[in-house]
Amino acid sequence: MSTFYTAAELAKLGPDNIPESFSTARHLVYSSPATLAFNSPGAEGFGVKRAGLAIPGSVMLIVSPGCCGRNTSEISSIPQYRRRFFYYEIQEPELVTGQHLKRIPEAVEEVCRSLPEKPSVVMICATCVDALLGTDFDRVCRAAEARAGVKVRPCYMYALTREGKKPPMVQVRQSLYSLLEPGTRKAADVNLLGFFAPLDDDSELYAYLRGCGVRQIRELSRCADYDAFQQMACANFNLVLNPEARAAADDLYKQHKMPYIELSQLYRIDKIHSQYQALAGAIGGTIDDAEDYAAAKQAVEDFRARHGALRFAVGECLNANPFELSLALTEYGFTVREICATAQSGYYRWINRLAALSPETKIYCNQDPSMLFYEEGDPVDVTLGKDAAFYHPGTPNLAFNSDRQPFGYQAVRRLFRELEEVLA
């Protein structure tokens, strides 16, 4: 039988006593639906490999045993990634002697010679074998830069560090933004940091920023070329929309004295309103969100009037924090029967509130081996996230995991619009 804890049980244990089943460092890892879909430091969505190629004109050299690079062939079939992946396959004798580290600069030079134009940057993607060896890839990249005459940066597809202080998706953002060179700061420019695809075009955040006097809003994913990317160094401040970009924003503050403000991807309408008002106060502007607030609230009410108090199972492979989203659904009058996600101490602001409103909500860890024996219990009407769909086959599912990111009131409207389409 699968191991789970109710929201009430987790809240009682507290953030300092999270059960071992939620820590992948303390047990074997089950190849859950998340990893079967390559949603790890791997392929689907923006894992390390796609994220590492976010810089326009960049290419990637994957340094790994053959097995670790295999799933990249699927990404290579996407038109914008053709001729951007290259491989250095480490042989066992090289791994034992460390000889491959001396040959990487030569491989980078060969990659550059093979291309009609010199790349803007070569990203070296390292795998777990070098994590175990403790390889200093910063030093390797400096040697490769000197030999090939091109910028070289590391990114780490280290599944072993996913639960550490600097997981792969944090580090890859630091590597990318470390390429920004000092620029002339402009008071009316701002960067949006956090995602590797743009926000949805109809997100109200753009209009709110312009209403506060911002003239230029830059996102890495909207940069047409390397020069456009370098213009991000001109921003007056950064908006961090994903906590995985916080370390990169800290680096930019230390290197370029560029401050940042952090916003969260939320689905509780009252909290979205509070966040926007705090943003307006921080940048000295005014945000009138009454119309958007009312439209989001109406979308929720109309959906509930048509479908009643639906029962949900929520996964973690989606464009939301599963605990914040589950709390939002509960506050809107729906029932969340299950959450398949990894509980962390930073999520207790939502877990505690969820425990008060829905103490019997079951919380499973996707990667706990006991999920092999999951048995469907109480029925649910709809699942959110493809991992939740795996556990409830035949139940209507909304994956809600597109590359383009919803944000703010627009995210709430989009969620319930797409739920309506699924149930129709």
Image (cartoon, rainbow, N blue to C red):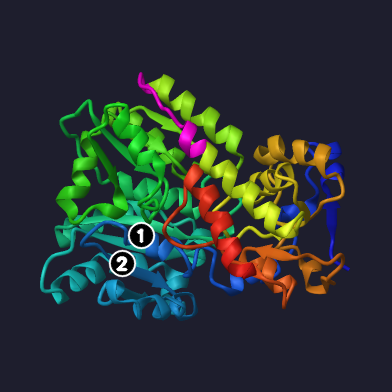
Q: Quadrant of the N terminus?
A: bottom right
Identify the element where label 2 is drawn. strand
Q: Residue furthest left?
A: 116
Residue in the picture at 55% in, 62% down:
418
Nearer to me, 17 or 9 = 9
Q: Position of residue 320 (x, y in %)?
A: 57, 51
Nearer to me, 176 or 313 = 313
> Residue 288 magenta-drawn?
yes
Q: Quadrant of the C terminus?
A: bottom right
Residue 164 visible: no
Q: Position of residue 187 (x, y in %)?
A: 22, 25
- Circle 2 crowding by C-alpha within 10 Å: few under 14, some 14–19, many from 20: many
Residue in the picture at 41% in, 67% down:
98
Residue in the picture at 50% in, 66% down:
129
Q: Nearer the N terminus, badge 2 or badge 1?
A: 1
Identify the element where label 1 is drawn. helix
Q: In the shown orientation, is residue 195 left or right of residue 231?
A: right
Amino acid tagged 2: Met
Residue 203 visible: yes
Give residue 60's mark: 2
Q: Which residues are magenta?
A: 283-293
- Circle 1 crowding by C-alpha within 10 Å: few under 14, some 14–19, many from 20: many
> Residue 61 magenta-drawn?
no
Q: Against 208, is 198 above or below?
A: below
Amino acid tagged 1: Gly
Q: Position of residue 217 (x, y in %)?
A: 27, 40
> Where is residue 119, by image quadrant?
bottom left
Mark 1 lies on residue: 52
Asked if labels 1 and 2 touch by Cβ distance under 8 angstroms, the answer is: yes
Residue in the picture at 68% in, 58% down:
306
Q: CA distance from mark 2 to mark 1?
A: 7 Å
